[in-house]
Image: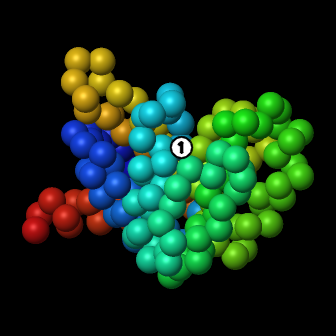
């Protein structure tokens, strides 16, 4: 699967989509969340953490930059909103988290060229005519494409039930 588009009508639906993604996530997976302020990136992350059966609810780590949520799969949640350049990201050693869990990054555009190439790109865009969010997902390598395929199958099974 090359790209998947889903419409979310509510915040709860965005969390549910994230939860379905989190139930399919594995150690080594990278999810990059793009969207303007208030688009729903942290809601998506909260759902991912729920789906990965994390013990702690995800919240915006803007002031601490990196939060860790232990669960069935350990989720490393990174918010790069306050990062001013890719050089600052090197010190976070985000690549070292991948052997211990999955990495979810908000505002990845602030670290271009530093984050792993194989990542599931998730773009959350508000619809200008409604309160809906259009969520598009695209894999950029073998791991992220496999995650996208597992997620697409999971969503298809949810719809059939």
Q: Nearer the viewer, residue 135 or 80?
A: 80
Quick check: can you spot residue 80?
yes
Q: Residue at x 72, y 74 (%)?
A: 99
Q: Position of residue 76 (x, y in %)?
A: 64, 63
Q: Nearer the viewer, residue 89 or 137?
A: 89
Coloration mode: rainbow
Q: Residue furthest top?
A: 129
Q: Position of residue 125 (x, y in %)?
A: 40, 29
Q: Residue at x 41, y 69 (%)?
A: 50
Reading the image, the residue beneath label 1 is 33
Q: Residue at x 69, y 42 (%)?
A: 80
At mark 1, the secondary structure is strand
Q: Is residue 56 above or below residue 59?
A: below
Q: Quadrant of the C terminus?
A: bottom left
Q: Position of residue 53 (x, y in %)?
A: 44, 77
Q: Residue furthest bottom?
A: 72
Residue 103 sits in quarter: bottom right
């Amino acid at each position: 699967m090359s790209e998947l588009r889903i419409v979310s009508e509510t915040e709860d639906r965005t969390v549910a989509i994230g939860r379905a993604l989190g139930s399919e996530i594995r150690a080594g997976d990278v999810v990059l969340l793009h969207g303007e302020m208030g688009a729903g990136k942290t809601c998506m992350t909260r759902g991912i953490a729920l789906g990965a059966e994390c013990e702690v609810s995800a919240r915006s780590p803007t002031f601490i930059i990196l939060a860790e949520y232990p669960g069935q799969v350990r989720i490393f949640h990174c918010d790069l909103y306050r990062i001013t350049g890719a050089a600052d990201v090197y010190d976070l050693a985000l690549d070292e988290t991948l052997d211990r869990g999955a990495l979810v990054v908000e505002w990845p555009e602030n670290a271009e060229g530093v984050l792993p190439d194989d990542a599931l790109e998730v773009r959350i865009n508000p619809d200008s005519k409604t309160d809906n969010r259009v969520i598009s997902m695209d894999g950029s390598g073998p791991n992220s494409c496999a995650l996208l395929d597992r997620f697409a199958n999971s969503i298809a099974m949810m719809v059939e039930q």
